[in-house]
Amino acid sequence: MQKEDIESLPEVVQAARVLKKLEGHGLEQVVIASGWTRSLLLNLIPNDIDLSYVGPVHYDKAQQYLAEILSEEGIDSALWDTTGIWNAQIANPAITAIEQHLLRDYVCSIDSVYLASDGRLHDTTGFGFTDALSRTLRLNDLETGDPRSPKAKVYIYLEGCRRIAKFGWKPTPETVDAISQGTHEWSNLSKEAVLYLIDRLKKKYQPEERAIAQKVYAEYGWGFVFDLDPTA
């Protein structure tokens, strides 16, 4: 589906209207990216709608505003992550623009394509639209900007593996190097981070999918995570 076709979809027009109303409540640069927009780009069934923004409005107020707007618009809130609306600037004061957040905290070029309140899809990296067409995995550069925690880095590497294993995306050579060379970060994780990442991996695969996925992860050095016991 072409960019213009996606932007003209009724659900996209509706979502942009919600973003516009949120900005009317003081939220700055509110966008939808990752899962929902990725599904639209890849002609998949969209999943939950995650919103991010910057500025001084606290999460609690943002959740309240979003719930009120969805009710006013008569929109079923089931698809919207109303409790997960994310103020990237409060979480990290170094972030002052939403594209900084997308480049820093989102996995790849396709995930970083976002819908803004103007009703348009914006390509943060300049590769997102073409990578979606070719199903190319191009990790965002983890070495730019402020340093990431080991947990943040490992999350990106494991999510990269998941996009290869579950969606059949083809990684760029640079992405292969980054994922493969990032395995040393596992030893830098806290116990809490290990538990979180193992539990998250478990939720992403049905039991019958794990063996096949593990073989793919193993190609990049990450197969060991499937064998770890979160209670150990």
Image: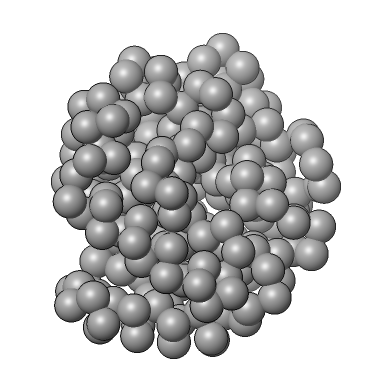
Residue 4 rendering spot, x and y as whole percentages: 28, 30
Q: Say which of 23 and 216 sits in front.
A: 23
The residue sitting at 18% across, 77% down in the picture is 74
In x, y percent, where is residue 57? 63, 78
179 versus 170 height, above or below: below
Q: Which of 194 and 140 is in front in this view?
A: 140
Q: In this view, does 89 lie to the left or right of 123?
A: right
162 to 116, vertically: above or below: above
Residue 220 seen anywhere in this rendered image of the structure: no
Q: List x then y, in percent, for residue 125.
A: 58, 29
Q: Nearer the viewer, residue 104 or 58?
A: 58
Rendered view: 149 above or below 131: below
The structure residue drawn at horizontal position 81% and vertical position 57%, both measured from the top left corner, is: 94
Quarter of the rendering occupied by the C terminus:
bottom right
Q: In which quarter of the image is residue 164?
A: top left
Q: Looking at the picture, how far across and down is residue 202, in whole percent? A: 36, 58
